[in-house]
Amino acid sequence: MEFEELFTQLLIDLQAVFRKNNKNTSLSLSQVIVLSSIPVDGIIMGDLALRIGVDNSTLTRLIGVLKNKGLVKKISYNEDKRSKLINLTDLGENSIKIIETSTSRITEKTLKSLSHSDKALLKESLNKLHWDLTKYKLSDN
């Protein structure tokens, strides 16, 4: 397979595995992405939209659903009442811990056939890929 096909298939496989292993939660993949992207000290809505690559209206809808589920709270940020800071609630933090545990299990099962050196090489390659994707995401290209 060429890189383009590999990227597409990897994205499809990751989503399918995630859904299979988290079907007991009431969260969609989009909601999990939002929750997982909120730092411990919170994040401004506009920055979160840039981080996950959605427009403000899409993020507003997602945050509304998460707020109704009691997973996030939205507060005014400093003097600008238009800016909203998003924080995880205790329930949101617990949900993230459950998802992280599931992800750890998936990772262990998926990588068990790799040698220690292959795992180290894969980790290094994935870190470089993540860095390059982050730079691309932030560029004007």
Image: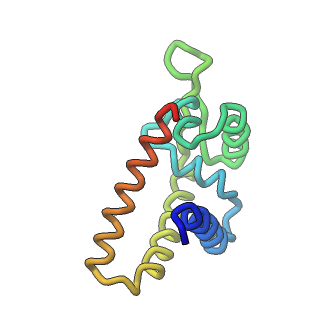
Please give left or right for residue 31 compared with residue 132 in the image.
right
- Residue at 30% x, 70% y is 121
Establish if 137 lies above or below 92.
above
Quadrant of the rendered image containing residue 118: bottom left
Describe the colour scheme in one phrase.
rainbow
Measuring from the top left, give residue 134's x and y in whole percent: 44, 44
Quadrant of the rendered image containing residue 21: bottom right
Measuring from the top left, give residue 68's x and y in whole percent: 72, 44
Measuring from the top left, give residue 35's x and y in whole percent: 57, 49
- Residue at 47% x, 36% y is 138
Outermost residue to the top = 79
Outermost residue to the front = 2
- Residue at 40% x, 55% y is 129
Residue 79 in view here: yes
- Residue at 62% x, 48% y is 71
Residue closest to the eye, 71 or 4: 4
Measuring from the top left, give residue 3's x and y in whole percent: 51, 63
Residue 98 in view here: no
Quadrant of the rendered image containing residue 114: bottom left
- Report the label total: 0
Quadrant containing the N terminus is bottom right
Outermost residue to the left = 117
